[in-house]
Image (tube, rainbow, N blue to C red):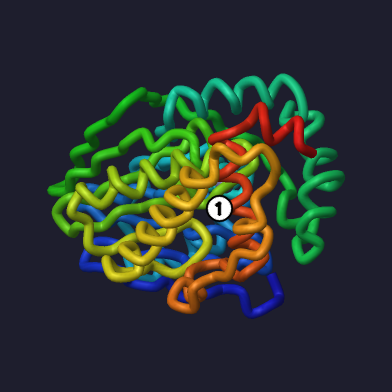
Amino acid sequence: MSEPRMRKLFQVSERVWIVPPQWKYVEPTIGFVLTDEGIVVVDSGNSPDHARRALTALRHVTDLPIRYVINTHRHWDHTFGNQVFGAPVIAHAFTQRKMLANMRDDWAPKQIINWVSGWVLKMVPTLRLEQFEGLRLVLPQITFTGKLELGLGGVHLRLLYAGGGHTQDSIIVHLLSEKILFLSDALYPNPEGKITKIAGLLEKISRLGAEKFVPGHEMPYDREKFALLKEYYQQLVGTATKLRSRKTLPQEIVRAKLESRFASLNGLDEQRHRELLERAWREWTPRRADRST
Ligand SMILES: [Zn+2]
């Protein structure tokens, strides 16, 4: 591509490099774990073009072969680069099942480019159709439920099911020796997911002992920021729980203020805060909430 989008890789630790995410193009983080016997890719990017640029950047760091690609969930921006890496794809069984279903429909070989131009390019007008040229979806061949231990070239990766805050099929990837946790999108609330599940997942993750966190659409962060995120969700769910007996949307939610210390969290402002609070409240009281609107 002609634009200066060939971003250099960012080194997270001795063995971990990432292509930093760019929200403007909905390019999520692409992670590379360098083992002595080759590379494990964590998420393959939003298009063949994105994946190719990532691979070119990686080749400035190492010539080792790509051994595996991990898809952290099925979303297009994390899976549409699969074909570029030429390695077996690992994912949760739900991811494979859902992608397979999509391939019989919108993502069928003859349909997929129409889907991209009719849906992706409308949603993300900064992307161009050429970036998807030759797109051929590669399904995960290796699947698991619960967890999968992957040992390769002196590295131990633990793939853990994270479930339904973002999507039902979300997983996280723990590189134990370097205390790095690839979160991908697991902690981003999505209409398909539940706020209360994110709060639960934050609890679970905090017990894993990771020190660096690599999210899908923002730069890696440390334990301190993770703790702040966890505290935010604890408060959110705490407030929603207290208000759950109300029959109509409580004024405490309509007029809620965001504590300034939480304003540094990704994408969080007063309006978003109220939306999340309302969603958490509706999760507690779905029947009543529906009747009141
Ligand atoms: Zn996603």
Q: How many numbered discs sit on the rendered protein? A: 1
- When the figure is inspected, residue 40 is found, relative to residue 247, above or below; the finding is below
- Can you give x and y, in whole percent of width and height, for residue 155 in the image? 17, 48
Furthest residue in direction front, as rendered:
246
Would you say 109 lies left or right of 228 here?
right
- Can you give x and y, in whole percent of width and height, for residue 98 in the image? 59, 25
Would you say 155 lies left or right of 72 here?
left
Toward the viewer: 111 or 62?
111
* Residue 86 in view, yes or no: no
Picture quarter containing residue 87?
Answer: top left
- Can you give x and y, in whole percent of width and height, for residue 199 in the image? 40, 46
Quarter of the rendering occupied by the C terminus: top right
Mark 1 lies on residue: 45
* Residue 56 in view, yes or no: yes
Toward the viewer: 290 or 25?
290
Q: Residue at x 68, y 26 (%)?
A: 102
Picture quarter containing residue 152?
Answer: top left
- When the figure is inspected, residue 224 is found, relative to residue 249, above or below; the finding is below
- When the figure is inspected, residue 95 is found, relative to residue 159, above or below; the finding is above
Kindly identify the amino acid type of the residue bearing the numbered disc 1: Gly
